[in-house]
Amino acid sequence: MDFAAVRIGGVRYDLDDELISWMRRELEHFVPQLDEVIEIYQNDTGLLERTRGIGVLTTDEALACGVVGPVARGSNVACDL
């Protein structure tokens, strides 16, 4: 996601049909691998042990830091800009 492309009133440029077609073709390469990626992220004990609880920002901490956008929503802030 390119945060610079978003502005008041919407995104700077719409996606044209050619780009959408290209994206769909490219995504077809990833679909067969999604099950493996999901399996790793949900069940790999080594990965889970190293990452569980890391980078957690509570709602109170998010409000105190003044975060907005995806970070605020991920921290369960009820009202975002």
Image (cartoon, helix red, strand yellow):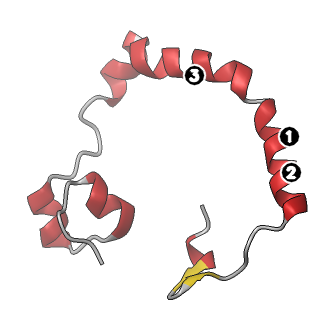
Residue 9 versus residue 5: which sits nearer the camera?
Answer: 9
- Residue depicted at x 24% and y 45%: 56
Q: Nearer the viewer, mark 3 or mark 1?
A: 1
- Residue depicted at x 43% and y 12%: 44
Residue designated by label 2: 21
Residue designated by label 3: 37
Question: Up-down: is 35 above or below 14?
Answer: above
Q: Are marks 1 and 2 in contact (CB under 8 Å)?
A: yes
Q: Residue 76 appears at what percent x and percent y?
A: 20, 54
Q: In the figure, is residue 78 to the left or right of 44? A: left
Quadrant of the drawing holding the C terminus: bottom left
Question: Up-down: is 80 above or below 62?
Answer: below
Q: Residue 48 appears at what percent x and percent y?
A: 35, 21
Residue 38 versus residue 19: which sits nearer the camera?
Answer: 19
Quick one: which residue is furthest to the right in this view? 18
Label 3 – label 2 distance at C-alpha: 24 Å
